[in-house]
Amino acid sequence: MIKIKNKKIIPNIFTFLNLFFGCISIIFLQSKNFYNSAIATLFSIIFDFLDGFFSRIIKSENQFGKELDSLADMVSFGIVPSIIVFLLFKKNTINQKIPCIEWFSFLICIFSAWRLAKFNTTNPTYYRGLTTPVNTLFFSSLSIIVMNNTTTPVFIKNIIRHPIIILFMIFFSCYFLISKISMISFSFEDFSWKKNKIRYIFLLISTFLLLTLHVVALPCIIIIYIITSVYFHRKNKKIH
């Protein structure tokens, strides 16, 4: 049995894997291979989760790991979604009437950096605003929908590719990345219905949407997640 003397290196290994797959995702995007890019992004999200998970288990959270994680996230969940949106702009002809509109896509990168820096310089007890992995998953799923030549209706693709719609998505994305809205947490303290009713209902709805809408369900689930979080955030503010 192999014993790891310095267990603190384990989370960093997952961080490096997150960064590695983020770079792979960018390579796939260069050839407009959105599907393989989305798979690489999914691996980045998994390794980003494992990084935090093992950091908490072995209690190895430190400033070096925190900074390293943010640098990896900047590539995987900052640059990647910006390139995806840039390519979505390029996939329509309407944007030719609006010069340089595709450069707005890099606002996502800028606001992702803002969020990550903000997270590193504060010590939040819970997540506020939309996390960069969820934001990336949203845009990555949109790219797959656009490239899906079989099941996705053409009118849905045309809506997603419309430059004004893309602009709205960019601005909303940037707003929620740095907002002070408390997003619903999926950290279960126990599995009782009373304490986790909202989480269970959301998971049931998400499962139903995935089974019926498939890849189209992903951006719908994230939108529902944001709307639900906003609702409960406003409700809690009124109570307090």
Image (cartoon, rainbow, N blue to C red):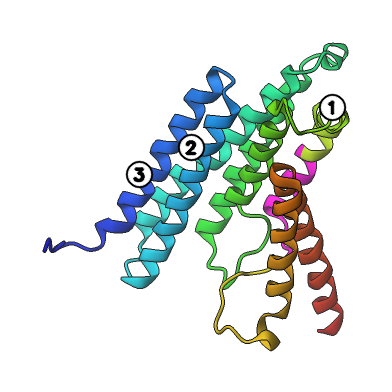
- Say which residue appears at 47% left-offset and 36% top-offset: 22
Q: Residue 51: image x %, image y %? A: 40, 57
Whether residue 155 sits left or right of residue 113 in the image: it is right
Q: Which residue is mark 3?
A: 16
> Based on the displayed image, in which of its 4 quarters is residue 21 positioned?
top left
Q: Is 1 inside the magenta-drawn segment?
A: no
Whether residue 145 sits left or right of residue 21 in the image: it is right
Q: CA distance from mark 1 to mark 3?
A: 39 Å
Q: CA distance from mark 1 to mark 2?
A: 26 Å
Q: Nearer the viewer, mark 1 or mark 2?
A: 1
Amino acid found under the numbered disc labelled 2? Ala
Q: Earlier in the sequence, mark 1 or mark 3?
A: 3
Name the one closer to the observer, 166 or 190: 190
Q: Earlier in the sequence, mark 1 or mark 2?
A: 2
- Disc 3 crowd, CA 10 A, few/some/many (<14, 14-19, 20+): some
- Say which residue appears at 67% left-offset and 22% top-offset: 87
Image height of 184 relative to 71, above or below: below
Q: Is residue 153 visible?
A: yes
Q: Residue 209: image x %, image y %? A: 75, 55
Q: Which residue is mark 1?
A: 154
Q: Residue 110: image x %, image y %? A: 63, 38
Q: Earlier in the sequence, mark 2 or mark 3?
A: 3
- Say which residue appears at 63% left-offset and 37% top-offset: 140
> Based on the displayed image, in which of its 4 quarters is residue 174 positioned?
top right
Whether residue 2 sits left or right of residue 8 in the image: it is left
Q: Which residue is mark 2?
A: 40
Name the one closer to the observer, 48 or 234: 48
For label 1, the SS is: helix
Amino acid found under the numbered disc labelled 1? Val
